[in-house]
Image (cartoon, helix red, strand yellow):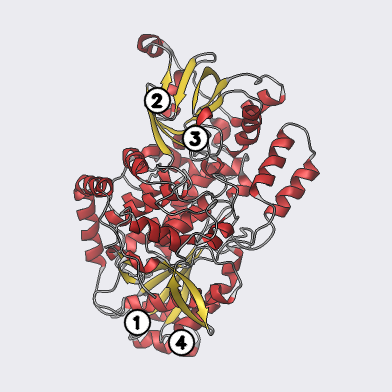
């Protein structure tokens, strides 16, 4: 196998990385000092109190017990987000035994150090449980810290895929960054009903053209087995990010579950963790995650039209490592990074089509060849990202890597940097007298990117859906959905808005959304100014918008403007919201502390890092 030859770094990538590095000096230095203070030479469990160590190995098989007791061989932590309700995480049920066997073959041992929760946003969309979703990220981060706090492990294998799980696992692991860390994916489900057809049936249902049984049948054909949902939402964006950031094996993101290649990649992840723990100092997480790797993650997100949730999650992940990024960084990088992939909702393909067209190896090679990624970074495979411009395969039953395909297998899905779908990454920063927000336009047709219309103001997506059902939205309008920010109600995704708004757009109306809430993988053909900061409950101007106010949302010029003069706007007394219903039931009482302490959306919305 040859390696890709990276081009000279694009000047904008270099400039923005330098700015982030300068901005982060103080926080980064403090974080690195903390990492250094936790490092110790040799095995982590060496010198532990006898009772402490005996508790750690008490339930291990005899051979593993002896190995741990002797304090010479590496001992690996498994932190798992397994449950068999999430299709993506169901395969993880078999992973601990596979990992333990692979560890023994590599002269090491492994234990399940802890489990973290994993909720399915697909189940809770539009329901009360969705208000726990964002801050489940913080619970997962803390759960990861609890698992690793036993301090008997020399490396960690993290098992997680979906929306908040990967960010939470990484945020938690970054507090133990003196350890080597390898993420272990399980892969996407095989393709079912096409995402375009699923979306069409959803719009028909919203219009009353088909009944619930037809809708349920379409959904069941789309989500039909074990593995990640195949559209390019946050879960699959997570997998792309981990790979482009060098935190999981090359080409491992989109290999389907329960296949020989998938099992070989899992065993190799264990071997890499063992090898990384065998150096002094070890090839720790702190040696991988730096400003360059964070920029690589943003570039990968933009080049693939990934989930807007990462304008929150990547910010929080970076802060967990003492690195400060903001939406200016995303927007300026987007102007320099071309869109190389079209995967639903930015196109008709799913991630299996993306994988077949050349997948991550092709994408990374193209970005390296255009100077759009930092090649001189550390990864779980060692130094240099060029190793990731490859794809895994089984050579007579043995795992090997070969060069990514020279040409895309489907130019409608994946293209070279010389012939992108668009010259920019499709993520824009919108600014104006309403604040700052982001909009993803990679799936928004040019004729829909500017909307000037009167506001329809609601404080709950169900209120807007009710207006639609009553036939009161047959016109141009900007839906202002407020009190949906992290402090108000935990910032749920407003996924249910897309089918009716998409149907109205198809009927010829100019429609858009402005909200301090999230849209995530639902961000599609309707322009949506999301994550508006400051949020309504934080004193944001969105709280003063009234029905009928004219709003201009212009994606191309980056403008989000309420056409009300400053004096009039300042004189308005915003209504006092009744958020009591968002504070109780479905466990929401337990998350009050997170809501009260949440940062702004642009700061990652996390209460854990200031």
Q: Which one is nearer the viewer's eye here, 592 or 242?
A: 242
Q: Name the residue under label 1.
A: 50
Q: Is residue 582 left or right of residue 169?
A: right
Q: Nearer the viewer, mark 1 or mark 4?
A: 4
Q: Does residue 380 appear in this view?
A: yes
Query: Of label 1 and label 3, which has the lower sequence position?
Result: 1
Is residue 186 placed above or below 439 in the rendered structure? below
Q: Quadrant of residue 588?
A: top right
In the image, residue 44 lies at what x, y percent? 31, 76
Query: Of label 2 and label 3, which has the lower sequence position?
Result: 3
Query: Of label 1 and label 2, which has the lower sequence position?
Result: 1
Query: Of label 1 and label 4, which has the lower sequence position?
Result: 1
Do the numbered discs 1 and 4 sit on residues whose CB atoms are within 8 Å?
Answer: no
Q: Which of marks 2 and 4 is in front?
A: 2
Q: Residues within 10 Å of mark 3 (few under 14, many from 20)?
A: many
Query: Of label 3 and label 4, which has the lower sequence position?
Result: 4
Q: Work out how far the residue at label 1 is from the one at label 2, CA to CA, in angstroms.
A: 64 Å
Q: Work out how far the residue at label 1 is from the one at label 3, CA to CA, in angstroms.
A: 51 Å
In the image, residue 256 lies at what x, y percent? 58, 66
Do the numbered discs 2 and 3 sit on residues whose CB atoms are within 8 Å?
Answer: no
Q: Name the residue under label 3.
A: 517
Secondary structure beneath dot 4 equals helix
Q: Residue 559 carries which label?
A: 2
Q: Mark 4 points at which residue?
A: 105
Secondary structure beneath dot 2 equals strand
Q: Does residue 45 appear in this view?
A: no
In the image, residue 102 lies at what x, y percent? 48, 82
Q: Work out how far the residue at label 3 is from the one at label 4, CA to CA, in angstroms.
A: 48 Å
Q: Kindly identify the residue that appears in the image at 42 percent across and 62 percent down.
A: 243
């Amino acid at each position: 196998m040859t390696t890709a030859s990276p081009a000279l770094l694009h000047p904008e990538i270099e400039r923005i990385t330098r700015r982030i590095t300068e901005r982060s000096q103080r926080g980064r230095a403090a974080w690195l000092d903390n990492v250094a203070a936790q490092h110790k030479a040799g095995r982590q469990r060496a010198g532990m109190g006898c009772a402490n160590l005996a508790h750690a190995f008490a339930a291990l098989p005899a051979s593993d017990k002896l190995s741990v007791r002797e304090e010479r061989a590496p001992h690996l932590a498994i932190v798992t987000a397994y449950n068999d309700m999430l299709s993506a995480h169901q395969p993880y049920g078999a992973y601990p035994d596979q990992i333990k066997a692979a560890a023994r073959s590599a002269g090491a041992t492994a234990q399940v150090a802890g489990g973290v929760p994993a909720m399915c946003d697909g189940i809770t969309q539009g329901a009360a449980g969705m208000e726990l979703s964002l801050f489940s990220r913080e619970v997962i981060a803390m759960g990861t810290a609890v698992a690793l706090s036993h301090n008997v492990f020399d490396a960690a294998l993290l098992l997680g895929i979906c929306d908040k799980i990967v960010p939470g696992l990484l945020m938690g692991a970054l507090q133990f960054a003196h350890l080597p860390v390898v993420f272990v994916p399980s892969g996407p489900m095989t393709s079912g009903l096409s995402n375009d057809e699923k979306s069409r049936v959803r719009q028909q249902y919203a219009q009353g053209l088909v009944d619930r049984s037809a809708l349920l049948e379409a959904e069941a054909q789309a989500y039909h087995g074990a593995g990640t949902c195949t559209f390019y939402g946050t879960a699959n964006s997570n997998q792309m990010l981990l790979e482009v950031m060098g935190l999981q094996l090359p080409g491992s993101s989109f290999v389907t579950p329960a296949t020989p290649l998938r099992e070989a990649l899992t065993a190799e992840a264990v071997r890499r963790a063992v090898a990384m723990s065998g150096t002094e100092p070890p090839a720790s997480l702190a040696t991988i995650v730096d400003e360059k790797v964070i920029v690589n993650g943003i570039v990968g997100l933009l080049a693939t039209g990934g989930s807007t949730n990462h304008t929150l999650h990547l910010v929080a992940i970076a802060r967990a490592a003492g690195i400060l990024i903001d939406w200016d960084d995303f927007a300026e990088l987007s102007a320099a990074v071309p869109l190389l992939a079209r995967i639903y909702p930015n196109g008709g393909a799913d991630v299996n089509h993306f994988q077949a067209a050349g997948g991550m190896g092709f994408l990374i090679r193209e970005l390296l060849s255009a100077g759009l990624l930092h090649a001189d970074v550390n990864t779980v495979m060692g130094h240099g990202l060029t190793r990731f411009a490859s794809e895994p395969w089984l050579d007579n039953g043995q795992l090997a890597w070969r060069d990514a395909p020279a040409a895309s297998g489907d130019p409608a899905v994946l293209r070279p940097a010389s012939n992108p779908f668009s010259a920019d990454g499709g993520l824009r920063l919108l600014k104006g007298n309403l604040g700052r927000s982001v909009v993803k336009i990679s799936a928004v047709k040019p004729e829909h990117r500017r909307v000037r219309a009167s506001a329809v103001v609601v404080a709950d997506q169900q209120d807007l859906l009710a207006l639609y059902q009553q036939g009161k939205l047959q016109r141009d309008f900007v839906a202002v959905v407020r009190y949906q920010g992290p402090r108000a109600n935990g910032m749920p995704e407003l996924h249910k808005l897309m089918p009716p708004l998409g149907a109205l757009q198809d009927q010829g109306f100019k429609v858009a959304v402005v909200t301090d809430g999230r849209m995530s993988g639902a961000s599609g053909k309707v322009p949506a100014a999301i994550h508006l900061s400051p949020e309504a409950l934080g004193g944001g101007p969105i709280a003063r918008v009234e029905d009928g106010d004219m709003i201009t949302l212009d994606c191309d010029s980056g403008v989000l403007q309420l056409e009300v003069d400053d004096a009039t706007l300042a004189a308005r007394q915003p209504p006092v919201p009744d958020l009591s219903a968002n504070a109780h039931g479905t466990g929401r009482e337990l998350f009050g502390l997170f809501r009260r302490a949440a940062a702004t959306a642009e700061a990652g919305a996390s209460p854990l890092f200031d």
